[in-house]
Image: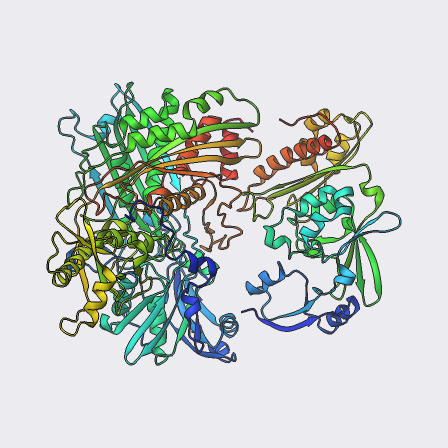
Amino acid sequence: MAIGKSATRVDAVDKVTGRALFTADLVPHQHLVAKVVRSAIASGRVLSIDVSEAQKVEGVIAIFTCFDPDLPSYQIYTAGHPWVVDPAHRGDIEDRHILDARVRQYGDNIAVVVAEDTVAADRALRRIKVEYEEYPIIFDYEDAVQPPAGTPPIHEECPSNVQAEWDTQTSLEGTGYDSIEEIHGDPAYHHGSYTMRTPRQQQAHIETCLSYCYMEGDRLVCVTSTQIPHIIRQSIGLALEIPWGKVRVVKPCVGGGFGNKQDVLYEPLNAWVCKKLGGRCVLLELSREEVFAYTRSRQPKRFEAKATWDDDMNLVARSCEGYSNSGGYASHGQAIVANGQGSFRYMYSGQEKACYTKALTYYSNQSTAGAMRAYGVPESTWAAECMMSDIAYDMGWDGADFRLKNAIKLGYSDPFWPAPLVCVSNGLPECIQRGKELIGWEEKKKLYANETGPIRHGVGMALLCYKCSVAGLELETASARMLLAEDGSVMLELGATEIGQGCDTVMSQMCADAVGVPLEAVHILSTQDTDVSPYGAGAYASRQTYVTGIAIKKVAAELREKILAYAAELIPDGVNLDLRDGWIVGGPDRDNPQPLMELGELSCIAYYSRTNSQQISAEGTAQTDLNSFCLGASFVEVEVDIPLCKVQVKNVVQVHDSGQIINPATAAGQVHGGIAQSIGFGLYEELLEDPATGRTLNDNFLDYKIPTTLDIPDLTAEFVETWDPTGPFGNKSLGEPPAIPAAPAIRDAILDATGVKLYEAPMTPQRLYEGFQAAGLV
Amino acid sequence: MYDITYFHEATSVQDAVKALTEHPEAKVIAGGTDVLVQIREGRFGPTELVSIHELRDELWGVVLDEDETICIGPITWFHAVNQDPICQERIPVLCEACDTPGGPQLRVSGTIGGNVANGITSADTASTLFAYGARLVLEGPHGRRTVPIEEWYAGPGKTVREHDEILVSIQIPRDHYEGFYGDYIKYGKRNALEIATMGCCCLVKLTDDHETIEDVRFAYGVAGPTPCRSHAAEEAARGKTVAEAAELVGDAALEDLHPRDSWRASKDFRMQLIKEMTKRALVNAANKGGSSASWK
């Protein structure tokens, strides 16, 4: 069996040796380059663009501005979601033109220069003169809902600047209260109220965002670094008003996305420019600075929350309002904070009588935010865990006991999900137990209890709860195709995209077991090409192993059936025929079948038979409405240098219940990467914008602080392998959950070490200084 | 692609000087770890470059001259200074400082001369060279001149080097280093690939009891627009025991140093760092000289 083994990644050798081909490796020799002309203001309107000097630069081919008459007049949405057939259920906001005279963020796309090389393009950019009418900048929530007089709304269609506001209130029936506020005011209980903030974290994938487009006949080809090739095809079709079949999107190897590439970034502009130039090949490659400031990021959020609890470690009620800043455009908009607030509710649903959440997303003139790994849940978990951490600390309770008592229980059914969303597998108690052992919870708590002096230590923890996919709320579909080659190997084609996370390997493992061949006999096509690849929505929502796995199981069953039918013809006296490990086996004793024919022999006969020639293949689509909960616990040990306001993370242990683990080695890799990103969220990473200009201040890897290997300790990842009945192989999901709990666990550990409660992530030295100063420690 | 319109690979210092004379807009490039980054950012537009990268015979390596002045060639990599036996023996704190810029790749292309010639307050070696009272030798069309580091900086990112002059040697005289123990603390927001939020170098000479401060120097990066010393802290420490001085130097340093508010760090936080780092640098340096004082 291949499942459950730490198989070497199928792309390991190519990626280690540099043979793997990424978009930039494939650009045809004869190509032009496009550079976006960006607004030098954050809000206003372009009055004129003078390109006369720029056009004189040698090597400049064309300059297209937001006043170009060929620009489509309608707006598109950019969130990377599959098409929604029913117009009433289309939630993504169509609020973006390819180029626009209305400037809504600093660096907005107002024109494009096409040149023979980047030097010529850059020289032209510096010679373009733009006249603006400027509007006051709407920076945060207060500005958005109460802008200075005379400030036009950021989008005409949204006069309030509030994209959406949703409330959920669990039923109060049988609680004896008429409102949750009544519970929060009941003198029988303890109460707390809290304000938490989370940062504009950037995905900071190593491969920048780039694409190139050219035309073949009347069809447009776009090769792009994306998580969502099929959705990019749909979006280019919608943006340019051309039939989707006339667009071909190719996704080669991708160097990371973390949600940024689950968005339609510059592909429609690239395609439009290519079309304007008669189909000449045009490369549009963003610099690192542009990726930071002008693609997407995690939406900055503020949470206003309340908690009520009793003397016996029970939560009684929680309320949480989440305010999310999507910037100049909606991108994924309200879906993100709403998803986060869901996890807020599920995670500590164990004892409480009532839970209220509000999700609100507003426009501002900050840069556009969108999807990032774990889609709102690291933020809402930060909010939930700050509260748990404070309550346990103030009450003198063990944080692990308190959390376990109040955590989600087996059988939990969410009242708001449109389809059943039930906790059908729950390894959380074991995760907490194992995490405590690995970190040395009890011993360390004792050891560090009475420290004084400038250097102090602490341990902390946090939990996570994350859905396995978007099934039940949105479409979950996946397709697969399998072709049997002459030698009995299986060509596996999927719409599921490998973006560095390792999905090609686990898909191959699932295919090998489902068909009955050794792993080496599965050859997965890593490149998605929408002309030939089966449909897949793409890499997001931690969904691919969970959903595409179902398609693999279904198509493999069909392939096996066809193989065994052919085998039955070749081995007429065979009984109980089966396919195992690349052999047709059979015989009267089902428990001890005998090898009868190698699959390669069968397949070769099938291809070249003079009487019954067949290329044995299968393909199909699987759809699911079933969903489940991934769970886990993070435990952290820190050293705090109080006078220098520095935290060193000494140890992180994270234990996940993601159901059955398909590949322990790649799963551990996901956990390690997720912890590192969460350490970044908790201590380092934050894109900053100047409130006066809207310009991003730290659009580079020096000033945007990603933790380095010297900032991250050795990490321990373990798994509690429950069997989840909703997953194709007992598995749940693991793509995003690892990025959720380490940050609040660090916060809990700093509280343990210093007694200082911090509410804003990242907990930078500056914020630690402010916290320590307020506490009289410095 | 980089917008470079002229490139001259100099064959000698005088050849570089001549090229600079002929190209009044040209920039000097050695390791390129600052200049290429700035060209890529488009900061200069089309750029002319005069390279001194190949002048290893004239500008590379560390030698001890007859009066035991340490002479460091400006195109010597950070890593090469860090590994140099003369530096390790006589000015180990400069070796420590040379191990802090960027990451390993940067330290085998970035040069100590570039770190000083760029005039930047956050340069990791600048505060240490300041504490050592380094002398910087320039060569131009009319010969050589020597500038004490105290007179080198002309403002943020600016030095007194004329356009057609090349920094040819960084010199530390024997009496500037002999008998001193030193410590450099770089404060960054993370532990590698970092530009200093604050840098502090302390050099201390102890009396025979290993606890009394005979002489001391404190130099800082990022505490002002250029690297600088705190004479008030030095004054406060001289003649005291290390333990006594440790309690005084932090506040004393704040008399001389006036950091600014910026989005990178607030003034108050920088003052907290100056206070604490001055104390720790003194104690750490004195510990190397045998003192048993502790900052903890």
Can residue A539 be seen in the rendering of this structure?
Answer: yes
**Looking at the image, residue A600 lies above or below residue A361:** below
User: In the image as oriented, which residue stretches furthest toward the right?
Assistant: B66
- Residue found 71% across the figure and 65% down from its top: B54
Residue A477 seen in this snapshot: no
Q: Position of residue B105 (x, y in %)?
A: 59, 54
Image quarter (top left, top right, bottom left or bottom right) of the C terminus of chain A? top right
Residue B3, how many percent across, how many down?
Answer: 57, 70
Nearer the observer, A191 or B67: B67
> Looking at the image, how many numbered discs can be counted on the residues?
0
* Picture quadrant where residue B73 is located: bottom right
Residue A320 position in % (x across, y down): 29, 36
Relative to A652, is A234 on the left or the right?
Answer: left
Residue A253 in percent (x, y) is at 38, 62
Residue in view at x 50 percent, y 19 percent: A450
- Pick whichever, A375 or A427, lies toward us: A427
Q: Quadrant of residue A435?
A: top left
Could you tell whether A43 is left or right of B190 in the image?
Answer: left
